[in-house]
Image: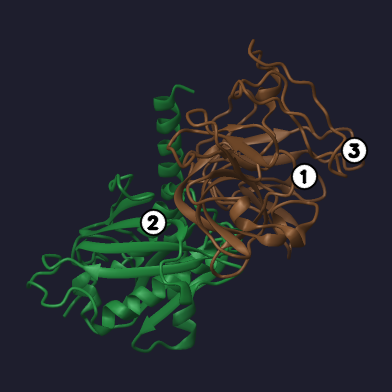
Chain colours: A brown, B green
Amino acid sequence: MVMELEEEGEKLVTPGEVLGKSSSLIAGKGTYLAPHNHIIYASLTGRLTTITPPDSKDQRPTVEVTGHKAYGAVPEPGSVVIARVTKVMARMASADIMCVGAKSVREKFTGIIRQQDVRATEIDKVDMHFSFRPGDIVRALVLSLGDARAYYLSTAKNELGVVSAESIAGAIMIPISWTEMQCPLTGQTEQRKVAKVEWLAEFNFSVIVLPIVSDVVADALVWIPHGTCISCSKTMLY
Amino acid sequence: MEYVSPEGLRLDGRRPMEMRQIRAEIGAVSNADGSAVFEMGNTKVIAAVYGPREVQNRSQQINDQALVRCEYSMANFSTGDRMRKPKGDRRSTEISLVIRQTMEACILTHLMPRSQIDIFVQVLQADGGTRSACINAATLALADAGIPMRDIVTSCSAGFLNSTPLLDLNYVEDSAGGPDVTVGILTKLDKVTLLQMDSKLPMDIFENVMQLAIEGCKAIANYIREVMLENTKELEYRRGI
């Protein structure tokens, strides 16, 4: 009576259907394991897929059910998110999470970046106003679900921090080091905790070619991208 | 009054163990995350599910699981005489609570902490068995919304009139004053999540009537599964898979 569609060995399942025993399968997304009888059931309506196991100790394949409704992403501890800074205070900054990984969220979530999570070194000497400003777009890592009000975020890695910011003059600033960004209109530099962006290393501008010097700050967190076009009068040397 | 004729036919021509005709439709409310229309005979119910989304009332937030809210209301035109107060009266509050508890038992709430799932059920035509139709519609709407569930919950009612167990009572049979047993079960797991009864029944007859209602639930579950699979195939076809 229940119709099963056999196409390339995959079939459609509905919630509650038995998929197998936990001794021979691992429960993946869209399935769950009932603790009392060790049987794996489907929890969504969708297509059943079996993933062959990698060469590890556990040789059981993983079963997954992919549903058709993709509801908005939800931040999980350990996921990288894109957020817009809304408030900057003495010991923390508030941000609205807009994307989780590559997916945008349906409704915004609130996150906070505490002073000790801004960077990895000298965390007690962090000045929040020299790290973020309201309106900055930051890439951050979700530390935990946090308290009742907001997720806890961290930017304490090279590739985390401000990815895009507007200067006081209103132009999008160019990153010049992990602590500074420069406005292309006025040439003024502003301090931020800047994220190291991969593509910057590959750009070739003919104006100034800068060597990479990395002998300054103890943990070698200083980086200067090759060939960034900055204002003509400055050469970056550390 | 005679509810079962000597030939064994009920007032609407059904046999005692026969259910009314059921019809289900998924995706009636395009704005909702999941929605369904469910008809059992003349009883017609529409359910809309919103969620999981952020909890609107912070004080009600649960840290390790999702909050399930349910609201049952009857349209003014759903009964013979125009209803004065569609929701907020005792019966609606009780049925809202009942549906919420039933659905909460089957949703895997621990997968969505600090979020909220809203189930709105509206009765468009009431002809007995509205509680059961609402639960069946809510199940379909939740499955349409892609909310992970343990199993499909289906519900059916059964009664006992003229010394005969009757399956799926309509309004006339329900108002006869006899016992009315409503059962909600998780069909594949074979677990009861809802059991309500009006009036009184001796224990041995109660077991027969409850078993009859469970059979009705299983028949509805088969139909609901077919509808879900059909809907999924339709969605895949439209996406070009």
Neighbourhood count class around disc 1 (C-alpha, 10 Å): few under 14, some 14–19, many 20 upward? many
Residue lying at the far left in this picture: please name it: B81
Classify mark 2: helix, strand or loop: strand
Residue B56 at x, y = what percent? 41, 67
Is there any visible trace of residue B163 in the rendered image?
no
- Toward the viewer: A171 or B147? A171
Marks 2 and 3 on same chain:
no
Kind of residue at badge 1? Leu
**Residue B173: quadrant of the picture:** bottom left
Residue at image mark 3:
A56
Q: Residues within 10 Å of mark 2 (few under 14, many from 20)?
A: some
Q: Residue at x 69, y 45 (%)?
A: A28
Residue A25 bears which disc, if any?
Answer: 1
Front residue of this view, candidates B179 and A9:
A9
A138 w.r.t. B161: above or below: above
What is the C-alpha distance between the residues marked 2 and 1? 33 Å
Tell me: residue A146, above or below residue A139.
below
Inspect the image, locate mark 3, and give the three-letter code of the amino acid beneath it.
Ser
- Measured as percent of width and height from the top left, residue A57 is found at 92, 41
Chain containing mark 1? A
